[in-house]
Image (cartoon, rainbow, N blue to C red):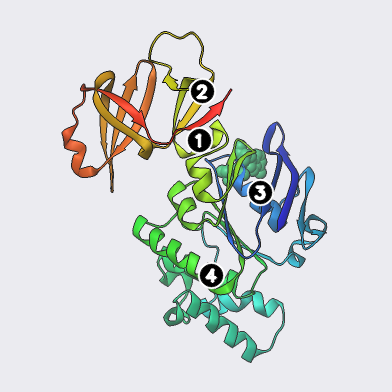
Amino acid sequence: MIIIENLTKKYDKTIALDNVSMKIPMGKITVILGPSGSGKTTLLRIIAGLEKPDSGKIIVDNEDILLKPPWERGVAMVFQTPSLFPHLTVYDNIAFGLEAKTINRIKIDEKVKWAANLLHIDHLLDKYPEQLSGGEQQRVALARALVVKPKILLLDEPLSNLDLALREELRYELKNIQRRTGITFIHVTHDQDEALELADYLVVLYRGKKVEEGSPRRVYEYPATIEAAKVFGHNIIEAHCSDKEVEFSWLNNFVETNCTLIIPQHKIIVSGNDDCVIIDKIYRRNYGLLIIKCKETILRAVVMLRELDNYKVGERVSIEMIDPHILRK
Ligand code: ADP
């Protein structure tokens, strides 16, 4: 485990990290998910030693790594924009970190070829960075980070600058590389698809605070906080919950709500013709989305793309929920 305890980092009046604690499993992929400005990069930079926190500890193997200089922490980092040396070949870029550690030529050659093979860039070793595409450059940056066999690999949105097809391809490869090497990956992203696909363990940050952590499926379907539900774009419905039933806030005339329902967009079923109205339809890559208004509450419901044409804007509907997640007030 990497145990992060009460980490706080302030920049003047901005609190980038607010008393953040979490336990990151070793030998797995942990994804830190959060919107822009939630403190993800700050957390990675503190682990890497590029930034000092105001308070807190990061315990790895019973030692607080914050007390060690960056080069003794066993960490390597890959950034959103690959920062390769333009005057060095791909081979020399990958070998750079090894040469600093002064091991012999034959060993260096073996390791560079191992890393190049892992990232499928064997055929690019003699080229210079400017001769490579963005995706190829990021592969070189990954190979350079992996070649030193770090204990922890920090990945700061490494796929964000790539086009969608390439992003999905590299995502899949990253997972394979982690499985083959067993290195602990800490991967930061604002993209929830990427987070759910990659994560063995998922941590959600929101405005400098940790608002969830756990298995991706549990965190996605049953988030413990409204903030985490917001990060995923789930429906958040005020309701009245009793032992017998759950009543939506827009039904009947009860005075107070006493619970909040968290319902992912795929867990709403649209039926009947009743108390809500479809106000918009959205065409997405693999599914359709209905925007529905129930009194003042706006909801989003996923429907199959081939069924999207069956719904009309302005049509009155009612909704049902599958397996609502109830947060009591
Ligand atoms: P994320 O990676 O989730 O987008 P960051 O960790 O980059 O978030 O930033 C968290 C907050 O800290 C933001 O409000 C950001 O503006 C602020 N911040 C980050 N770095 C600095 C800095 N060097 N100086 C001042 N404010 C900063």
Query: Between marks 4 and 1, how big is the CA–CA gap?
Result: 29 Å
Q: Nearer the viewer, mark 3 or mark 4?
A: 4
**How far, Cα to Cα, is label 3 from label 1?**
21 Å
Location of mark 3 (residue): 43
Does residue 138 sit above or below 311 in this rendering?
below
In the displayed structure, would residue 44 be above or below residue 144?
above
The answer to whether residue 240 is visible is yes
Q: Disc 3 or 4, which lies upstream in sequence? A: 3
Identity of the residue drawn at 66% across and 49% down:
43
Task: State ligand 1's quadrant.
Answer: top right
The mark closer to the camera, 4 or 2, is 2
- The residue that disc 4 covers is 179
Residue where numbered disc 1 is placed: 229
Residue type at mark 2: give it.
Asp
Which amino acid, mark 3? Leu
Graded by Cα atoms within 10 Å as few (under 14), some (14 to 19) or many (20 or more), the crowding at tag 4 reads: some
* Mark 1 surroundings: few (<14), some (14-19) or many (≥20) residues within 10 A: many
In the image, residue 121 lies at what x, y percent? 45, 77
Report helix, strand or loop for mark 2: loop
Question: Is 132 in front, or is 30?
Answer: 30
**Percent position of residue 311, x then y:** 19, 31
Mark 4 touching mark 1, by CB under 8 A? Answer: no
**Residue at image x 51%, y 30%?**
326
**Residue at image coords 51%, 70%:** 177
Badge 3 residue CB within 8 Å of ligand 1: yes
- Respond yes or no on whether mark 2 lies under 8 Å from ligand 1: no
Screen quadrant of the N terminus: bottom right
Residue 315 shown left or right of residue 230 in the figure: left
Residue 243 got which mark?
A: 2
* Secondary structure found at label 1: helix
Name the quadrant containing residue 329: top right
**Image point (44%, 33%), residue name:** 324
